[in-house]
Image (cartoon, helix red, strand yellow):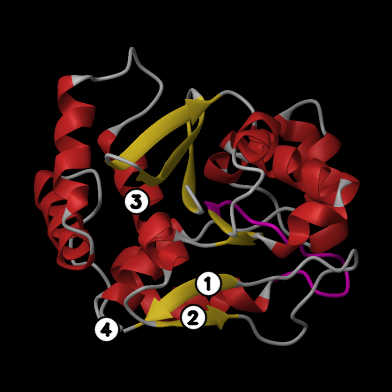
């Protein structure tokens, strides 16, 4: 499994990759467990903010570029990213206060719900420079946008129509996605991961393999945060 797509889920993290018998998904409680399992992977593309904003740059350029590319319907899927100091907050009120002081804005409930996952990945990358080369940020809707030739998905991912549209788009590039989803539905894990999590991780995987297009990234200036982590969203231009 040389290329891995990763999405956060209630159970932790779900990883999609190519095994000897086809595509496979696995669930890991912690990101450190996942990267240890795939220590030899060339690319691990993950749906989580990596480079973080600061007082001098309160909005990441890649986030605004993603919202502009996705348009009105899908742009709300790009959550505002917190400052690094807010990651240490013990509750949402404290996090909002820190973020307001540092960035001049509060935090949404959606952002708070993934704060612990942002902190997990940030701690990993701050403690080990070795992971910085192959662990890169994607946003699933940007991946779908790229695979669709620069057209945002019309329907929300948690609707039947949205799920089918994303599945059909991915199957155009990787037919094994259909069998993967079939196994997920028949072997349904006991909670903690949904069909949308599998599809998002699969979009990251298809992007990470890079077999059907050219790697591009929504980035901008500045392109890195104060600790040298890239502020970007990688996608395939097909």
Disc assigned to residue 215: 2
| Mark 1 to mark 2 CA distance (whole Å) | 7 Å
Answer whether labels 4 and 1 touch (C-beta < 8 Å): no
Eye-nearest disc, 4 or 3: 3
Q: Position of residue 60 (x, y in %)?
A: 68, 72
| Mark 4 to mark 1 CA distance (whole Å) | 14 Å
From this viewpoint, which residue is outermost toward the front? Answer: 20
Answer whether labels 1 and 2 touch (C-beta < 8 Å): yes
Residue designated by label 4: 149
Residue designated by label 3: 202
Does residue 223 appear to the left or right of 98 in the view shown? left
Is residue 203 visible in the rendered image? The answer is: yes
Quadrant in which the C terminus is drawn: bottom left
Q: Which residues are magenta?
A: 46-59
Q: Residue at x 80, y 62 (%)?
A: 103
- Please say whether residue 52 is one of the residues in the magenta stretch: yes
* Foreground residue among 145 and 106: 145
Instruction: Give the total of numbered labels.
Output: 4
């Amino acid at each position: 499994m040389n290329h891995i797509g990763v999405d956060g889920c209630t159970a932790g993290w779900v990883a999609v990759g190519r095994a000897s018998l086809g595509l496979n998904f696995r669930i890991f409680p912690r990101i450190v467990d996942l990267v240890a399992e795939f220590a030899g992977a060339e690319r691990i593309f993950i749906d989580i903010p990596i480079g973080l904003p600061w007082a001098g740059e309160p909005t990441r350029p890649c986030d605004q570029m993603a919202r502009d590319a996705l348009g009105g319907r899908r742009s709300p899927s790009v959550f505002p990213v917190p400052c690094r100091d807010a990651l240490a907050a013990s509750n949402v009120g404290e996090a909002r206060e820190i973020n307001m002081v540092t960035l001049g804005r509060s935090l949404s409930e959606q952002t708070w719900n993934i704060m612990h996952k942002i902190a997990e990945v940030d701690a990993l990358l701050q403690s080990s420079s070795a992971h910085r080369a192959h662990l890169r940020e994607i946003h699933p809707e940007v991946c779908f946008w790229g695979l669709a030739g620069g057209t945002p998905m019309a329907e929300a991912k948690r609707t039947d129509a949205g799920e089918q549209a994303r599945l059909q788009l991915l199957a155009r590039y990787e037919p094994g996605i259909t069998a993967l989803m079939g196994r997920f539905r028949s072997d349904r894990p006991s909670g903690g991961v949904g069909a949308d999590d599998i599809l998002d991780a699969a979009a990251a995987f298809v992007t990470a393999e890079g077999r059907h297009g050219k790697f591009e990234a929504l980035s901008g200036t500045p392109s890195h945060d104060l600790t040298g982590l890239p502020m970007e969203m990688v996608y395939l231009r097909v």
